[in-house]
Image: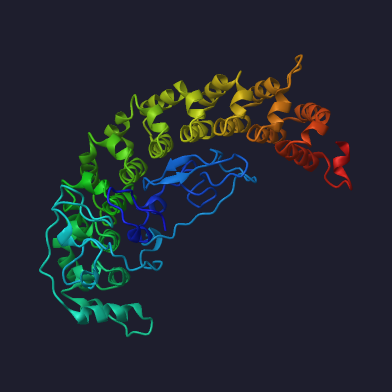
Amino acid sequence: MGVASQHPYTEPMYVSYLQHPSAHAYASPGQFDPTAPRGSAIGSSPGFDPQKGSLPFAYSSDQSPHVLRSGAVNSPSIRKGGTTNSNFYGNPTNLGLFMQYPTSPLTSPVYPGSPVANSVTSGRISESNRSSGSSVRGGGAYPGWQSPRLHDKIDDSKLHSFLEELKSTKSRRYELSDIAGRIVEFSADQHGSRFIQQKLESCSAEEKASVFQEVLPHASTLMTDVFGNYVIQKFFEHGSPEERKELANQLVGHVLPLSLQMYGCRVIQKILINCQSLEALEVIELDQKTQLVFELDGHVLRCVRDQNGNHVIQKCIERVPTERIGFIISAFRGHVATLSMHPYGCRVIQRVLEHCSDELQSSCIVDEILQSACILAQDQYGNYVTQHVLERGKPLERSQIINKLSGQVVQMSQHKFASNVIEKCLEHGNSAEREILIMEIVGQTEGNDNLLIMMKDQFANYVVQKILDVCTDTQRELLLGCIRSHSQALKKYTYGKHIVARVEQLCGDGEENPSSEF
């Protein structure tokens, strides 16, 4: 599990129960997410880098410090590896099948009559100890938005026994009718919520309508509940068009606070996921979604910088037609460089580059990136945005970045983050641009030790290896000649040995003693 958002009140006993708000659940398929594991199905991002030294702190979508490595993207090498772990409760790809989620003292809100209401022990925060309008660590209502209070607490041992039976694989087959009248309480329980979600996928329209009638009056509370939010999402997924519309009406006036809340932001994203479809029988009317999204007007930058809100903005950019979210793109004007150097902002800017269909709006965003290309290349987050333009941008945009970096290739290659940008320049530049960059390193000038300096450097040696991969045969022969002249010196350095190994791989394959050339 991930780590939940950082709140002022923290007790050690609660730490193991905190979960990631939705970074993996709703992370963009883009390649340049600095807070997702590199090589994951979601996209490439930094993992541990044994060659690039200690890892800088980054803030993922849970506002907790995470260590970052280099900004390299999708390049298999010893410094670029990692696995993905999206195991958190409620993976949206299969909401009916969840990992085991421990019984949390923070299940929130604690519904009176629910089995979790009776399990609060001394030392844990109960609802009576919370001030009015406060937010529970585990996902209570967003401060300032008062959810309707439920009925008085009911001591019901039968309910607890029923939930225990649900946990057992040997229990008899239960139906939704068995919990009629207690749907809301079950929705706020881990196993009860899972049971309801599974049943909603296959139950009859009549059963679904019966459950919906119980859920609707408490929808605003369930949307911000650690388990209840998944029941609401299930209705947006499997409910009738009328039910989805009624639930969406419950969001009116509350989109901003929900977007900033750990679990509420998932509900907002669920609404937006199929927004590109215009079939009213499949999803809520696009006009209704547009109306909901427009509630974020004037608060876009706040959402982008928020651990939960940034995911909502990303989904808006991905799923809502550009002509309907002009206010979002316009909000970035004059702030692109700053946002590109923000742990969440860099994700949002990349989504704009990928999905913005307005040529004028997109050009304005790219222009601001190009103006700060050198600064962004050296930033732990900004380098991803620069790489994105190099890999997916127009040829003229790539050329502008390469021209800005030329003349300082050696210096940038020795930088932890900029070195990855230089690699992208070599990989995606045209032959003429590549020639300029390579000759800057190996040019025949008196006292030119640039290549030796780079081969011994912990970051720049990867740039040399990249050159060997992408250069022409003529350029490779020139490089190999220079490398051979420094062969003895290279063997004395940790990173120089990497170059020796790479050259052996290129020109010594199949020989009994390939290193004899050195």
On screen, residue 141 above or below 152:
above
Q: Position of residue 385 (x, y in %)?
A: 47, 33
Left or right: 430, with 373 as reference point: right
Q: Position of residue 491 (x, y in %)?
A: 79, 37
- Which of the 4 quarters of the picture holds residue 159? bottom left
Regarding residue 288, the answer to whether it shows in the image is no
Q: Position of residue 254 (x, y in %)?
A: 18, 47
Regarding residue 296, the answer to whether it shows in the image is yes
Q: Position of residue 371 (x, y in %)?
A: 45, 21
Query: What residue is drawn where x is 29% and y is 33%?
Result: 326
Left or right: 45, with 331 as reference point: right
Residue extending farthest top: 446
Name the quadrant of the C terminus: top right
- Which of the 4 quarters of the picture holds residue 475? top right
Left or right: 127, with 190 as reference point: left
Query: What residue is drawn where x is 56% and y is 51%?
Result: 82
- In the image, 155 versus 357, the foreground residue is 155
Residue extending farthest left: 152
Residue extending farthest front: 123
Name the quadrant of the N terminus: bottom left
Query: What residue is drawn where x is 30% and y is 44%?
Result: 309
Query: What residue is drawn where x is 53% and y is 31%?
Result: 390
- In the image, 49 versus 185, the foreground residue is 49
On screen, residue 317 above or below 214:
above
